[in-house]
Amino acid sequence: MSEAQAIDLAVIGGTGVYALADLADAELHQPVTHYGAPSGPVRVGMIGERRVAFLARHGEGHSLPPHRINYRANLAALKSLGATRVLALNTVGGISERFGPRVLACPDQLIDYTWGRISTICEEPGTDVLHVDFGEPYSRSLRQQLIAAARSANVALVEDGCYGATQGPRLETRAEIARMRRDGCDLVGMTGMPEAGLAREMALDYACVAIVANWAAGTGPNPDEVITLQDVLDNVAAATGQVGKLLTVLLEP
Ligand code: HPA
């Protein structure tokens, strides 16, 4: 497979999504970019008749915490392989009532609470300073394609929502989530930024499907409940079949 062949869709998998079950004949690529190495190998294979690339954001063995991910290298690696459309799968906590565990959502807004991450490709002296428009942080056209695919696949997908990106790797306090709710966040995750902003700077068509793994701290029917990694992984595993169905329809010829 030559690198010049276009990739129809690149998928970045989050916590609990370390492979795409339907990816056939996958070849491993290890691109090294101007920004360094991505989180791990990029698998390029076929879903139906479409070429799809997959990258596990935290590494295949989940070895990278959110603040250590080289977001620039990940996106640059996918772009160098010929991707222009990037679907980010993000495992999140649900804050508002519509976003309980196992819900899939396609957010249309975000708020960035992260800090200390390299959040632009305009870092080095001599690079052009970009002030990209980010009023609508996710690609309108890719969101529309995802929403249409979900409808026709009969996959329940909440078609909007505001993603709040926190620093992690710890989970949030109840007060932090209460503040985020007041700010208008519906979902909370640790990896939505700077990825979305960098994708815009790199002119990639980028959208997110968030997989709700738990009620965020202090929310839901048992606000005192402790959030465990096992619950997170179990809920993501339970939802990935629906993500696969959505992808199959999204990639239909
Ligand atoms: N908070 C932040 N990130 C997350 C959560 C959460 O509750 N669940 C899964 N990722």
Image: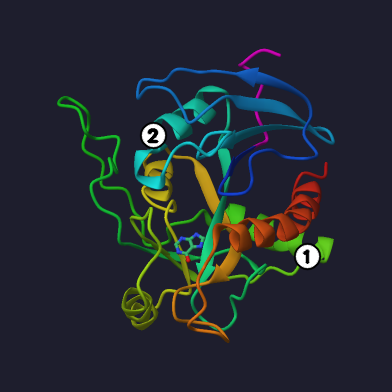
Range of the magenta residues?
1-9
Residue at horizontal 55 percent and vertical 83 percent from the top: 220
**Residue, x 82% and y 66% (percent of image)?**
154
Of pointers 2 and 1, the one earlier in the residue sequence: 2
Q: Which quadrant of the structure image shows residue 177?
A: bottom left
Indicate yes or no whether the magenta region holds residue 127. no
Q: How much space separates mark 2 and mark 1, taking CA atoms? A: 32 Å
- Please name the amino acid that badge 2 sits on: Asn
Which type of secondary structure does the marked residue at label 1 adopt? loop
**Residue placed farthest to the bottom in the image?**
221
Q: Which residue is mark 2?
A: 70
| 82, 195: nearer the viewer | 195
Q: Amino acid at mark 1?
A: Val
Q: Is residue 5 magenta?
A: yes
Which residue is labeled 1 in the image? 155
Which structural element holds mark 2? Answer: loop
